[in-house]
Amino acid sequence: VSPSTCHLHEGWLLTPEAAAIRPEEATAVVADVHLGYEWSRGNAGDCVPAHSLAETVDRLERLLGRAKIRKLVVAGDLVESARPCSRTAADVFRLNDWLHERGVELVVVPGNHDRSLSWMCARRPKSAAPGPIVATSDVSVAGWTITHGHQPCEGDRVMMGHHHPVLNVARFTAPCFLVGPRLMILPAFSLNAAGLDVATAKGNRRWPGHELRCVASTGAELLDFGPVQSLAAPIGRPSGRISNQSAAT
Amino acid sequence: MSTIDPMVESGKALGLLSEPVRRWFASEFPTGPTPAQATAWPPIFGGEHVLLVSPTGTGKTLAGFLAILDRLFRDQATNALKPGLRCVYVSPLRSLGYDVERNLSVPLAGLQATLGLAESPVQVGVRTGDTSAYDRRKLRDHPPHILITTPESLSLLLSQSTWRDHWRGVEHVIIDEVHALVPTKRGADLAVSLERLADASGHDPQRVGLSATCRPPDPVARFLVGPSRSCRVVEAPRPADSPALELEVDSLLRPGEGPHRGLTYRRLLRRLRRAIEANRTTVVFANTRPMTERITHDLRHQPPGRDERGEAPSYDRETDVAAHHSALDAGRRREVEARLKAGGLRAVVTSTSLELGVDIGTADLTVQIGLPGGVAHCLQRIGRSGHRVGAAPRGVIVAASASEVAGAAVTARAARAGAIEPLSMIESPLDVVCQQLLGMACAEETSVDSAFALFRKAGPTADLDRNDFQACLDFLAGELSSPAGAFEPDPGANPRWTSPRIWLRNGWFGVRSRRVQRWLWTNIGTITSEESVSVIADGKALGTIEGRYAERLSPGDRFVLDGRTLEFRRLDGLLLHARVVGGEPGALPIWHSDRQALSSELAAEVAEFRAEAARRATLDGPQAVRDWLADALELRPSAASVVAELIEAQDRYSETPEVNALLVEEFPSGTEPGLTYAFHAPLNRAACEALGRAISARVGRKFGRDLALQTADLGWSIRLPDDARIADEDLEALTSLDGLDDDVLEGVDRGDLAARRFRHVAATALMVLRNPERGKRVRVGGLLWVSSRLYPLVKAACPDHPLLRETKREVLRDILDVDAAARWLATRPRLRLRRLAAPSPFTLAWISPGADEPLHFDTPADALRRLHARMTASTAGDPT
């Protein structure tokens, strides 16, 4: 693995696919997959093309090429729909089958969107491979507690998702990791998730005392942007238009 | 038609009316019918389709209605008047509908009294988006003789099977303010609805269009009746004794002063206060909603300062000044309109929402802040004053800079001459076609062939292509196929669309479920708006602000709405809770609306007189130029001096471009390293933007780096990255006519214009719902999901999607003016390149800095890498 593509942090290999790999445990952690996003949209009345399963599989394919992986832990929000949705359920089993064929076990730490995951898992097709495993509580990998992050979590070292951190550059949005010695926040695996802009005051004051660094993904490589607190000044709030309009006579 | 002698005609016209109607009219209007009425009644009686073109305040409502009322009363006299719809009146404004209802109640009550009846035999009903569920049911079960409605509500009623049988009795359709609908998608939508109404009625109801002055009237007539019917155009002359309009241009800058926002804004407020003091009621057009809010707030609250001389106004600032714009709560708007009509307000500040319709009674002055965006708009606004008999419409255009004085001068000159811009229809908008197809499916099972024939009868969709039509149906049915290589698992298979709306079989189509019907009913219409958030303050709905703006607020932030300063408390989905606070104005809420612009004729005129003034300055000297400008532009001497000074400054610093030259000025970008190029051309914004995008595409290809483009009337600027530079010999190729269309398209694709328009197209076609069902809104993805994610997804899944084609058509045909740009380039303008140390006076005046659009020629990854390199370099150089 080329060190410029990935980023090593506290024994974790962070990858441009928004995953954290623990090589000695052959385990990868991702968060916020939001599978079946389009079905939720469809249920609300939108007529859009199905895409989230294809995109997820495509990214996982690249991820599995980076290291030997036997277990994929989803740190919450595997699915978008918090209501029972049979089309999402079908996609979950398609994803699980695809992983099973490649010898990867799927473990899900439930997030706030996963309320109906047990309902979906109960709709297992006869031919489906075993899994996914829905954890009843937080999972531990190499001494790190993997949690979703929508609820307070006890743990010495915590890895979570939920916040979808991003770095806004011009009008382009780059997903980014926020990493510190005792806390790691994963970017959303789904491209559909709009996120928390880490360069705003709202974003970088959220976890005081954690000395988080921002590691952003170009899609092909990771770039270390340094401490989150130092980001706001050079990038600035994207709000320069307020003053322009005020006295536009 | 225009040779008719009104005096002779008026006698004849009265003779057409039945006895009681004539008696009522004669007692009510002893002077007889107005010319508009006298010329319109005969063809309306004759059952022809009629377009009545007449200025405001000439009795247009009765001109359209009285002949129809007469028919109803004749039927009543022979006991042939049965319950049921007879006439549908469509108004583009809800408030106009209520106004008409009130205006109709006068003749109806009069006729009822004349006939000595206990109650009026003719029933009138109003159906708009504001109508309560109870009244809707009542209207459906007992339709009135005359139904007053809006284009959206008409489309909605046509899409309900319960209304299906009501249309049979309809014999007349009146469309008010039809000129305002012609150049819009809303108009295209209405034109198709009218065909659906004709189809449902089983015959072809008479159409009567009421229009303000339009030249030429033919496109409006064609819009009204479509390609296959004939239409009688009746142009009513202005009453002979009506006074000419008074319109002047007022410069907030004095000679010798540079533009200064703070100074001109304070002068503007003083100017407005003086106008309000001196007039009974003043209507102020502020163009944008933030400006409307700001001015209302300041007129109400600004404490008397140094230059106020401590005089208290003769009116109550808090209650006698009101704001009016379409983001305000409907109830609040109605209240303002009612008070305005009753003469209870001294000033109303409006964005553009009072431009049409509503009779505002006692208004005697209109003030337009900045350019009104064309002669037609200008006249329409001035027409809001002087509705009293014998009073002249009076208007002032207040200009804050030399370039605004110039633009205002040519606009005012054209307005006095009545030279309004020609109108043209939107041609076959496919998003509207999709919405109407869904509407037809919701009403009943429909044959594909008859639906296509119906579209071809309406003016805007007369040339609808059969393949485009089929693609719209396939999209709604979820059957659009994707090409090989799209991301779907099986190449060539249909992409799976999440919720198809219709079924499509054996040449018929129909709606899939009642849910889809509900989705249409709650999302009908074509009015585009950014996602908005409702503002509730102290338990009262005040209006809406833009969603993107609301998302950035934190508790304690202050903003202004309805002229009140509000403090943000929390955002709860699409509800914003706020608290009213007094005193200091906050930051202003942002709304996006397409910027107003000069027409191409006016832009060319400005360019021409600039060049002429520069020539005269060299030949005849400064005083002669001032005299000539004052004379030619009908300006006051001080305002003429302000314009002359700008031209003299430009000539000292750079040069005033000839109309047959493209002047390019290079100067260092102010805020960042690198160079900016300003291009000056005698074109309006739509043409400048087309040419600017094409040249940006060519520059971008050459350097492979991001640019920033800013467009305006009479020019545009392109900011280049720090190591790029345009050489003299590059200009020829950059301005070549070869491949212009393709380069305009590339320039569009590199920016966010197409993605932004796609949001609206997708919403109108109901690909995404503006108003999803309660509790089902998908929040993950944010407000911009449609432009940032769905747009590329649809491009990948189905590159020939009808909504992508519609987006492209709208951008190239409606927003940009590629043809005008190409015509000008074909004249082979001389190319002039000047390298300057700072932006020239013309650049500062016309292409003001601020809202540029980045055009991406490097990949997002490159942009991120560049930012990273810049930041690591700056930290490395930082001694801490």
Image (tube, coloured by chain):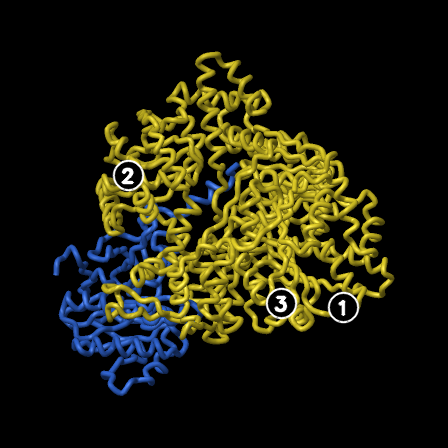
Chain colours: A blue, B yellow
Q: Are marks 1 and 3 on the same chain?
A: yes
Q: Could you give the CA–CA distance between mark 1 and mark 3, rounded to whole angstroms? A: 18 Å
Identified by mark 2, the residue type is: Asp
Q: Is residue A9 above or below residue B389?
A: below
Q: In this figure, which residue is indicated by the disc labeled 1? A: B80
Whether residue B546 sits left or right of residue B747 in the image: it is: right
Residue B71 at x, y = what percent? 74, 59
Local secondary structure at mark 3: helix
Q: Could you give the CA–CA distance between mark 2 and mark 1, rounded to whole angstroms? A: 68 Å
Whether residue B201 sits left or right of residue A161 in the image: it is: right
Q: Outermost residue toward the top?
A: B620
**Marks 2 and 1: which is nearer the front?**
1
Report crowding for label 2: few under 14, some 14 to 19, many 20 or more residues within 10 A (C-alpha): few
Identified by mark 1, the residue type is: Ala
Report crowding for label 1: few under 14, some 14 to 19, many 20 or more residues within 10 A (C-alpha): few
* Image disc number at residue B738: 2
Q: Outermost residue toward the left?
A: A1
Instruction: Pinpoint the chain carrying mark 2.
Output: B
Instruction: Pinpoint the chain carrying mark 1.
Output: B
Q: Is residue B828 above or below residue B616?
A: below
Q: Are marks 2 and 1 on the same chain?
A: yes
| Picture quadrant where residue B243 is located | top right
Identified by mark 3, the residue type is: Trp
Local secondary structure at mark 2: loop
The residue lying at 59 percent from left, 34 percent from top is B415
Q: Are marks 3 and 2 in contact (CB under 8 Å)?
A: no
Residue B753 at x, y = what percent? 38, 49
The quadrant of the picture occupied by the N terminus of chain B is: top right
Dot placed on the residue nearer the N-terminal end, 1 or 3: 1
Residue B529 is at least partly visible in this image: no
* Image disc number at residue B167: 3
Instruction: Pinpoint the chain carrying mark 3.
Output: B
